[in-house]
Image (cartoon, rainbow, N blue to C red):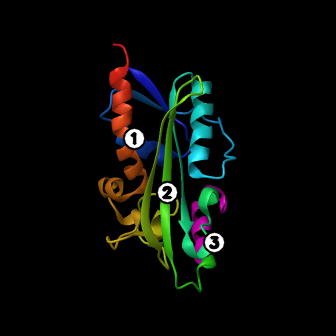
Amino acid sequence: MRTLVIASGNAGKIREFQGLLQHLPLNVQAQPQGFDVEETGSTFAANARIKATAVAAMAGSWALADDSGLSVNALGGAPGVHSARYAPTDPERIEKLLGALSNASERHAQFCAALCVAAPDGSVLIEVEGRCDGWITTTPRGDGGFGYDPIFEVSCTGLTFAQMPLTEKKSHGHRGKAFALLEPQLQDLLSAEPR
């Protein structure tokens, strides 16, 4: 069975990907603790590629990397690729973002997830991107999820990601949409492998 290393130290992302990948013939593993890759790209896709190729080379197996983030229209697309570094912790990131939007009437935002699967030789096997439109709430709602989930209300649902069960988040969310594009390509790669 092919090993696929999730190129992330984020426990929430790892759990989410393990759930999304559980039905595929893959041995899904988290990247080794303490292995960090500097995200120097200017786009989500570039950062996913940087992480996937670095982790694949280090692990000697395929690696799946995600770079995702929140882009808020009223903030010129910020926090964007800096979403995870916008402030030190999830509560501080939420507080900072809500503070930046305290007088904003335009609260539209998009979550974007870029996924990349790379091989140990540095080749990129798959790249896809998924988006989810919504807006930033004025206060956090819900106990689930992670990151900005409590303040991102998904268009046409009336719910934040933090209020959604994982199955609903998968169908509406940026990572789920990206995964829906990735999955058939990943299945094709696995089918093409010699048995």
- Residue 182: give its label: 1
The label nearer to you, 3 versus 1, is 1
Type of amino acid at the residue the image marks with label 1: Leu
Marks 1,2: beta carbons within 8 A: no
Q: Residue furthest top?
A: 195
- How far is mark 1 from mark 2, CA to CA? 14 Å
Which quadrant does the N terminus fall into? top left
Type of amino acid at the residue the image marks with label 3: Lys
Q: Position of residue 192 (x, y in %)?
A: 35, 21
- How far is mark 3 from mark 1, CA to CA? 33 Å
Q: Is residue 19 above or below residue 172?
A: above
- How far is mark 2 from mark 3, CA to CA? 20 Å
| Residues shaded magenta | 84-98
In the image, what residue occupies the spot 34% across and 29% down? 188
Mark 3 highlights which residue? 96
Q: Is residue 43 above or below residue 160?
A: above
Label 3 secondary element: helix
The label nearer to you, 2 versus 3, is 2
> Is 88 covered by the magenta stretch?
yes
Label 1 secondary element: helix
In the image, what residue occupies the spot 36% across and 25% down? 190
Which quadrant does the C terminus fall into? top left
Circle 1 crowding by C-alpha within 10 Å: few under 14, some 14–19, many from 20: some
Q: Position of residue 164 (x, y in %)?
A: 34, 62
The mark nearer the N terminus, 3 or 1, is 3
* Frontmost residue, 84 versus 44: 44
Q: Specify whether residue 135 is in view.
A: yes
